Image (tube, rainbow, N blue to C red):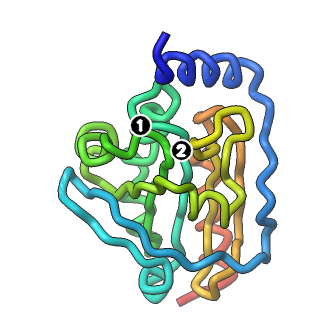
Amino acid sequence: MTLTKIVAAAFAVAALAATPAMAALAVGAPAPDFRAEGALGGAPFKFHLAEALKKGPVVLYFFPAAFTSGCTIEAHNFAEAADKFNRMGATLIGVTAGNIDRIAEFSKSECRSKFPVAGDPKLRIAKAYDATMALFPGHSNRTSYVIGTDGRISTVYSNLSAQHHVEEMLAGVTEWRAAHPR
């Protein structure tokens, strides 16, 4: 059995259990600045958190591995909501430490060219955000954050199930916007 199949099976079991994971970065904590390379619509893309925050809040979501069932569902859900995030002035980016060799393809097909995904091959970003998987070293946990323009975490949601990340992040950006009118 390949590592991808093992990881997919583990995610399926975890999703059935729907046991929330705990992210260490709490609301109000400073968000670690980072730079990352990835893809948007299959083309190379560079991201810098500090630059993105100058435009508005950032929705940063970590996912375990491209083209696994849960990560594909989550990418589709974020792609469907991308225009809503854009209308709220939020920048959306996905980050993975798993199979980064396929993120260009994933950004085009599963993210539907709506938002960038970045690779985190050494888990540098995931570790800074405490979004690593204990059971599968080398993979990001499924954790989502809203980061306000002040560089602080305003919303965090960590759960191996891909089902509620988009709704939680939309609610988080809405709450942040209400507290920080333009």
**Left or right for 26, reference 136:** right
* On screen, residue 12 above or below 62: above
Question: Which amino acid, by three-letter code, is at mark 2?
Answer: Phe
Residue at 48% over, 37% down:
65
Name the residue rendered at 58%, 35% in the picture: 162
Instruction: Say if 86 sits above or below 83 in the image.
Output: below
Mark drawn on residue 66 = 1
Using a 10 Å C-alpha cutoff, classify the residue at mark 2 as few (fewer than 14 neighbours), some (14 to 19) or many (20 or more).
many
The one of 49 and 130 positioned closer to us in this rendering: 130
The percent position of residue 10, horizontal first and vertical second, equals 64, 20
Q: Amino acid at mark 1?
A: Ala
Label 1 near label 2: C-beta < 8 Å?
Answer: yes
x%, y% of residue 21?
78, 42
Within the image, what quadrant is residue 153 found in? bottom right
Find disc 2 in the rendering and name its residue: 63
Q: Residue at x 61, y 73 (%)?
A: 147
Crowding near the residue tagged with mark 1, few <14, some 14–19, many ≥20 C-alpha atoms within 10 Å: many
> Which residue is at the far top?
1
Tag count in the figure? 2
Q: CA distance from mark 2 to mark 1?
A: 8 Å
Q: Tell me the element at label 1.
A: loop
Left/right placement of residue 62 relative to residue 65 reads right
In the rendered view, tell whether residue 91 sits above or below residue 12: below
Task: Name which residue lies at 67% across and 24% down.
Answer: 15
Point out residue 143 in the picture as x, y percentages from the top left corner: 65, 50
- Across and down, in percent, residue 154 comes to 71, 71
Q: Which mark is residue 13?
A: none
- For this view, does 9 lie left or right of residue 54? right
Report the residue that reaches farthest toward the left.
43
Q: Secondary structure at mark 2?
A: loop
Judge whether 109 appears above or below 33 on screen: above
